[in-house]
Image (cartoon, rainbow, N blue to C red):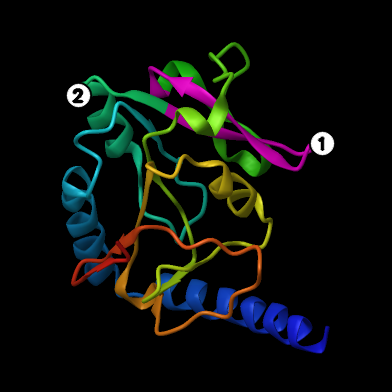
Amino acid sequence: MERDHQKRHLKRALRRSIKKSILGLDPGVRAAEEAALIAQFPALPGYAAAHTVLLYVKAFAEEINTRSFFLHAMATGKRVLCPRVQREENRMRLFQITSLSANLEPGILGIPEPRDGCAEVEVEVAEVDWALIPGLAFDFRCYRLGRGSGLYDRLLPGMRPDATCWALSFDCQIAPELPIEPHDVPIDGVATPRRIIDRR
């Protein structure tokens, strides 16, 4: 019990530290790193062959802008899904997005999310071939540190074994080894402007 408490405390401290590091980046350096990450997106392993992809919308100042990812996926004929948080159920539901302007609206905390009326995916995460997963930090084993809500921790175990999950990260978000708990699930890989960490 004490060890679990220590891990949770360490995770909270890491979240604060990583946010500070990202927001403290020189604006020119950050812009260059973000441009490099955006350019890498179409070449991430498994993406080109995927039919149904799960993407997230930028929700916080420390995240990269994912708008171009949605546009690329839709332009190349992929079925694009986006999550919406269902607070009363404490989980995410997935909806198909065909237009950023028509399908998204400010939701909880002003974060863009699918509007009412978007097509909900009945089989949900089992239909996803490839997913871009957010996180505040990642390690060399491809474990991730989220924001503490556990939403992706509940989503990831439902992915098909053959589905692929990747993340894009600033270099300052990479840690040698994150504290992990039994519910933590590693993803397949993380790409930064300077390296590729591929668990497979």
Corner quadrant of residue 117: top right
Q: Which residues are magenta?
A: 81-100
Q: Secondary structure at mark 1?
A: loop
Q: Which residue is mark 2?
A: 76
- Reply yes or no: does residue 183 show up in magenta: no
Can you tell which mark lies on residue 17? none
Corner quadrant of residue 141: bottom left
Above or below, 77 relative to 161:
above
Residue positioned 38% across, 26% down in the render:
80
Question: Marks 2 and 1, how far apart in space?
Answer: 35 Å
**Residue type at mark 2?**
Thr
Residue positioned 30% across, 74% down in the render:
171
Q: Position of residue 167 (x, y in %)?
A: 36, 56
Q: Name the image quarter holding the N terminus.
A: bottom right
Q: Which residue is mark 1?
A: 88
Q: Earlier in the sequence, mark 2 or mark 1?
A: 2
Above or below, 120 relative to 69:
above
